[in-house]
Image (cartoon, grey):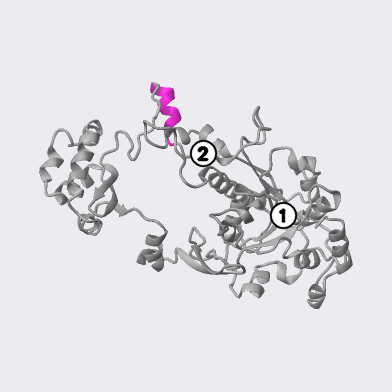
Amino acid sequence: SSCSTMARRSNNCAPIASPKPDCLPPFNRNGQFWRQRSNVENTGALKDIRVIELGQLIAGPFCGQLLGDMGAEVIKVEPPGQGDPMRNWGRGDDKLWWEVVARNKKAVSANLRIAQGQELVRKLVATADILIENFKPGTIEKWGLGPDVLQAINPRLIIVRVSGYGQTGPYSARAGFGGIGEAMGGWRYIVGDPDRAPSRMGISIGDTLAATYGCMGALAALHARETSGKGQIVDSSLYESVLQVMESVVPEYHWSGYIRERSGSFLPGIAPSNVYQCTDGEYLIGANQDAVWARLAAAMGQPELAKDPRYVDHVSRGKNQIELDHRINEWTKTLTVEELEALMIEYSIPAGKMYRAPEMLADPHFAARNSIIDVETERWGTLKMQNAFPKLSDTPSRVRAPAPSEVGQHNAEIYGGLLGMNESEIAALKAADAI
């Protein structure tokens, strides 16, 4: 392939002839492409890493979001025309989820169900470090894009595969969504009030956990590649990602036959730790450690409670949890949220308000840490959203560019600039409905 006009101007471009080419157009590496567009410097730890994202909906794209926030160049591949269904997810007419999950990404289109589209992915893979997919196991193999094919093209490629049940086992071929993984992993059963059906958390925690573990696996594989020189497959299932955060649920049953049940707003045996009523709202207090409980009793003006045999230690408070919560709640109902918070700060007791979006936007701590930032989007203007996280002192992650507003918005830049295709080649792909 011939170099693009921009690449030729650099006088240092050669055709791509190896899985990891030494020379790429200058705007495609080290964050330069993002800087040209958004004037935000790429300071991320992964700024020399390229990611091809084939996934859609939540788990795959959230994994791509995490890597992109950390500086990776993420090229998102979408079906021509319709794009990722996430473009149409949100409340009413406000389809805003896309603006978060697709930030820091470039959008190209490719029809993975036809040969020309599949070949585009193979060409992209030759230049990449990581590929993300969250289709049902066997799907990318059906498209001629299985790990054996892709790693033959690029042995250094790391492939993150997110699925409901994993790539192996008797359930692997089943379709799986986040809620199913939450149920199988044990989460759903213990969430909610004991006299009602299991509740959901209110966000897609199964998907985002699987995406986060997929991202973690990709980072570990990048480190391993430094010594091995080879990529590998990261197999992140929804149910096992949930299982990882289930604390001691399995060993408790195995050792003693105990099955953790739904308990509503508290954990059995952990007291006091609950949401309590004030005159004007609700407030969370966590004072289950003995010394902290003594400080709470003093804040209540009832220091003698800390030595009461019913509440004197962790085990005793657990046995008398309901009556202790009732006693505390009767006290908190005489105070406003602000009055209670002042006391909790004075007595150094872990506690906090119940935050919604309005409270987050008004809180000085959020502002001081830039937890929420303004992003100039192409469709909605300025939008407030969560900042990149976690915070790194030397290579900070950033939101460098808004989500692409159009399907295939960067076809010319990626297919022309990165793959070196000329205008007639790109036009032919479009005519064939490959892009």
Asked if 426 appears above or below 199 in the picture, the reply is: below
Q: Residue at x 13, y 41 (%)?
A: 305
Q: Which three-letter amino acid code belongs to the residue tagged 2?
A: Val
In the picture, the quarter occupied by the C terminus is: bottom right
Q: Are marks 1 and 2 in contact (CB under 8 Å)?
A: no
The tag on residue 82 is 1
Mark with earlier residue (1, 2)? 1
Residue 248 is one of the magenta-drawn residues: yes
* Label 2: how many Cα within 10 Å (few below 14, some 14–19, many 20+): many
Camera-side residue: 214 or 352?
352
Q: Is residue 70 visible?
A: no
Residue ranking furthest to the front: 92
Query: Would you say residue 208 is visible in this rendering?
Result: yes
Assign the magenta stretch its main secondary structure.
Answer: helix
In this view, the residue farthest toward the top is 257
Q: Is residue 330 magenta?
A: no
Local packing at callout 1 (Cα closer than 10 Å; few below 14, some 14-19, many 20+) is few
Establish if 92 lies above or below 372: above
* For discs 1 and 2, the disc positioned in front in the rendered view: 1
Q: For the residue labelled by badge 1, is the local secondary structure a helix, a strand or a loop?
A: loop
- Of residues 275 and 273, the one nearer the viewer is 275
- Give, as a three-letter code, the residue at label 1: Gln
Q: Residue at x 31, y 54 (%)?
A: 352
Q: Which mark is residue 245?
A: none
Q: Secondary structure at mark 2?
A: helix
On-image quarter of the N terminus: bottom right
Q: Which residues are magenta?
A: 247-256
Q: Which residue is mark 2?
A: 242
Residue 159, position as x, y percentages in the image:
69, 47
Nearer to the camera, 24 or 111? 111
The location of residue 144, given as percent across then percent down, is 81, 44
